[in-house]
Image: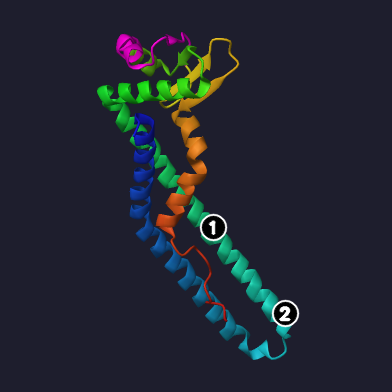
Amino acid sequence: MTQVDQLEQAILARAERLATEYRERAQRARDTILREAAEKLRLREQREEAIAKSLGDRAYRQQVQAEELKLQSQLDLLRWNLVREVEAGLADRMRAHRQDSTAYVKTLTAFIAAALAEIEHDAVEVRANNADLKLLKTHWEEVLAALPNGTQAQLGEAPIETLGGVLIVSNDGRIRVDNSFEGRRARLRSRLQQVILERLVPSGFDTGSIFGG
């Protein structure tokens, strides 16, 4: 398994752990929303019991459907807020990884090597944020030694805006491989969100049958 694969697995594993931590909170929030909704409906039914007989079945069903839509909207908002919280935790994981310079240089080297395999172009420019450029300059000979023979890689002079990782550009500027944290997260987003939602809400957030059969 390559460094790139290992980092992807670490990101997914972190997402799973964070999702598990938030799941209990999510369930409590869900139960509270459902309980409050059921209580509001019960009180409303009591108040309207005197005139319920004069209401047509169609009007009543429309009222219930409106309540269900409102509740589902609240549950959807809760779900995506939790997803965003877990995704924010991945950025914290990346910041922590950058603190271990030895391991992080290996990760950056693996990102560069993976990009070279995709580009199939020996002459490339490696771009990174300011801190990572300084780190790469310090270990550049070590990085080059780990790349395929014949690789003509050079560090870009202007830093890019990114939390971490690298952007690889062919020397003619026609091909780019975005192995920055943001680029890789964007490519993995669908898979990450699927994993997070599976851990947070394995049976899904729904209104259940609190408003009737």
Q: Amino acid at mark 1?
A: Asp
In depth, the one of 83 and 149 nearer the eye is: 149
From the image, tell me which residue sits under label 1: 76
The answer to whether marks 1 and 2 mark residues whose Cβ atoms lie closer than 8 Å is no
- Name the residue located 50 percent from the left edge and 51 percent from the top edge: 80
Q: Residue furthest front?
A: 149
Q: Quadrant of the N terminus?
A: top left
Q: Is 89 rendered above or below residue 60? A: above
In the image, taking residue 43 as reference, residue 14 lies left or right, namely: left
Tell me, yes or no, whether the highlighted magenta stretch contains residue 154. Answer: yes
Q: Is 44 rendered above or below residue 131? A: below
Q: Percent position (x, y) of residue 152?
A: 44, 8
Measured Cα–Cα span from mark 1 to mark 2: 26 Å
* Helix, strand or loop at mark 2: helix
* Helix, strand or loop at mark 1: helix
Say how many tags the image has: 2
Q: Percent position (x, y) of residue 97?
A: 31, 30
Q: Which mark is residue 95?
A: none
From the image, tell me which residue sits under label 2: 59
Q: Amino acid at mark 2?
A: Ala
- Name the residue located 42 percent from the left edge and 9 percent from the top edge: 150
Magenta residues span: 137-159
Which image quarter: residue 148? top left
- Name the residue located 31 percent from the left edge and 23 percent from the top edge: 106
In the image, taking residue 73 as reference, residue 110 lies left or right, namely: left
Q: Quadrant of the C terminus?
A: bottom right
Q: Nearer the viewer, mark 1 or mark 2?
A: 1
Tell me, yes or no, whether the highlighted magenta stretch contains residue 188. Answer: no
